[in-house]
């Protein structure tokens, strides 16, 4: 028999008993809908968990600290050579130290006669080429600095201008608050970072030496202002970034001017490592710990939360699978009853020389068709239920957690649609396997003698 004949016969047999076929399909629809919706709720919970973690910080960022509570047996120095080694690890996108010159007397000045002053304590030295990879956004300026940036280029935090104090006024009256007043108005800072001339000046290590110590001055090049994001660092708000080598030079000049010896270099206190994907964090973090460094990332929080979400998905999917199992019993029952009713028809086909394989194929096609069409309708119904859940803010926990982080309660990804459709069809084929084998074993002579 041609495949077209088999399909035609399959359709005619299903339509011959419309009510029974429809009731069996309804069972598959309910089972498919149950498993898809249940798993979609689990996917929504996972998305909510990821959104919550993302609000806490960058999931692909690892902080490295230069003290030895890592898992390694030896303690390396967190210097440029070590950071280069880390940058060559698989999955690492960018690496940069975070260097601050706390021990120098230096400030950023603006205005006539250095009227406005900002402490250098908020300035952090980094590898400038790593800035764009850290996910930091600029709200104005000429773009992120590169390796060829001006030696004294600087990128300010969104509210860093409010750090400038008026040296002509008394403490307590010498600053501008960036918080809105009672009328919601925000005052402009003393300094316009993009337009005013800015420079760094170093001073003496104590006030008694000011007249005898040479002052170093460095004109700054403004590169831009960063969007405030505390998850990316305090510097994006009230601090600033500049080339680490420039900051080191300023510190060395300060020590030289004050006739002091630079302390022994024991490496950077802190560095940050950006990896390409969440899945790479654990591997890279473990490798860094094996080098003897302490690390911190949100991966330690993410893993148990994801494990809990997977368990919830498994439970929800299991509940849906029970419904589909009941539907499978309905398909098997329908096909067995069909065999009893069509025993004579099966005998006639055998007598006419129909291949046994064709008879088996007909029954398997009928069972598979019931599963397939039930799966299609079930998936469409799942999308409707999912839309209603998301529209009306339903939450399985009643807490509304999903909407709090801007995620949907129910999310049906493409893989779940394919899974539901394939699973429903397989359930139909498996359920029809026994009845199909039963059909081909019927004796042709006995089948013809059967009243039908």
Image (tube, rainbow, N blue to C red):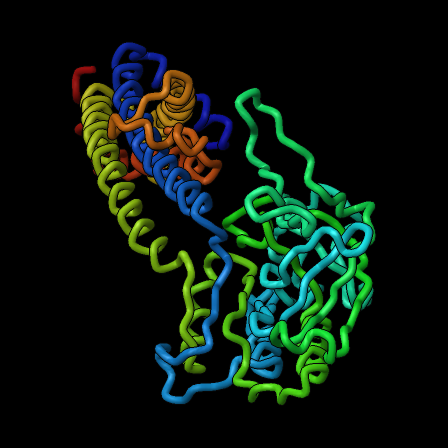
In which quarter of the view is residue 351 placed?
A: top left
Q: Residue at x 40, y 73 (%)?
A: 294
Q: Residue at x 43, y 47 (%)?
A: 56
Lateral position of residue 392 relative to residue 94, left or right? left
Task: Answer with the quarter of the image where residue 217 lies.
Answer: bottom right
Determine the residue located farthest toward the top in the rendered image: 19
Q: Residue at x 57, y 86 (%)?
A: 263
- Figure check: 304 above or below 106: above
- In the image, 450 versus 156, the foreground residue is 156
* Whether residue 227 can be seen here: no
Camera-side residue: 203 or 262?
203
From where the camera sits, is residue 285 visible?
A: yes
Q: Where's residue 139, x and y in %?
A: 70, 41
Residue 272 lies, in percent from the top left, at 54, 66
Q: Could you say where residue 187 lies in the image, as x and y percent from the top left? A: 65, 32
Q: Please state which of residues 436 and 406 is positioned toward the viewer in this rendering.
A: 406
* Quadrant position of the C terminus in the picture: top left
Q: Is residue 173 above or below residue 353?
A: below
Residue at x 69% of width, y 63% of height: 242
Relative depth, front residue between 20 and 172: 172
Q: How many marks?
A: 0
Q: Estimate the x, y position of residue 159 in percent, counting from the top left.
A: 62, 44
Q: Is residue 236 above or below residue 186?
A: below
Q: Is residue 109 left or right of residue 387?
A: right
In the picture provided, is 58 more to the left or to the right than 101?
left
In the rendered view, tell whether residue 74 sits above or below residue 140.
Answer: below
């Amino acid at each position: 028999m041609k495949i077209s004949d088999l399909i035609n016969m399959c359709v005619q047999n299903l339509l011959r008993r419309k009510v029974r076929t429809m009731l069996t399909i309804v069972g598959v629809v309910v089972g498919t809908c149950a498993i898809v919706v249940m798993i979609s709720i689990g996917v929504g919970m996972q998305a909510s968990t990821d959104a919550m973690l993302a609000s806490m910080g960058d999931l692909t960022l690892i902080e490295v600290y230069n003290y030895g509570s890592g898992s390694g047996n030896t303690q390396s120095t967190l210097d440029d050579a070590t950071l280069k080694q880390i940058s060559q690890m698989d999955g690492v996108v960018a690496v940069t130290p975070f260097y601050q010159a706390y021990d120098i007397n230096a400030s950023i000045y603006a205005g006539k006669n250095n009227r406005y002053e900002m402490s250098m304590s908020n300035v952090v030295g980094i590898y400038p080429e790593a800035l764009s990879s850290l996910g930091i956004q600029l709200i104005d300026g000429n773009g992120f600095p590169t390796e060829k940036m001006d030696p004294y280029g600087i990128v300010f935090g969104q509210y860093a201008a409010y750090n400038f104090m008026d040296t002509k006024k008394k403490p307590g009256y010498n600053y501008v608050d960036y918080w809105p007043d009672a009328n919601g108005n925000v005052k402009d800072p003393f300094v316009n970072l993009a337009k005013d001339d800015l420079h760094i000046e170093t001073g003496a290590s104590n006030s008694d030496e000011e007249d005898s110590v040479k002052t170093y001055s460095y004109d700054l090049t403004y590169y831009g202002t960063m969007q405030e994001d505390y998850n990316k660092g305090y510097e994006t708000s009230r601090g600033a970034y500049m080339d680490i080598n420039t900051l080191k030079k300023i510190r060395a000049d300060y020590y030289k001017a004050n006739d002091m010896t630079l302390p022994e270099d024991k490496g950077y206190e802190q560095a940050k490592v950006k990896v390409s994907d969440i899945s790479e964090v654990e591997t890279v973090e473990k490798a860094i710990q094996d080098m003897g460094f302490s690390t911190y990332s949100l991966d330690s929080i993410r893993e148990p939360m994801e494990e809990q979400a997977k368990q919830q998905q498994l439970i929800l999917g299991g509940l849906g699978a029970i419904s589909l199992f009941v539907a499978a019993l309905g398909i098997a029952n329908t096909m067995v009853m069909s065999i009893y009713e069509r025993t004579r028809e099966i005998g006639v086909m055998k007598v006419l020389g129909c291949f046994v394989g064709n008879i088996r194929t007909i029954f398997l096609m009928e069972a598979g068709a019931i599963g397939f069409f039930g799966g299609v309708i079930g998936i469409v119904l799942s999308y409707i239920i999912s839309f209603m859940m998301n529209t009306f803010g339903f939450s399985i926990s009643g807490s509304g957690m999903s909407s709090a982080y801007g995620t949907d309660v129910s999310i049906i990804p493409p893989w779940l649609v394919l899974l539901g459709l394939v699973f429903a069809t397989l359930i139909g084929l498996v359920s029809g396997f026994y009845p199909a084998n039963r059909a081909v074993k019927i004796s042709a002579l006995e089948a013809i003698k059967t009243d039908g």
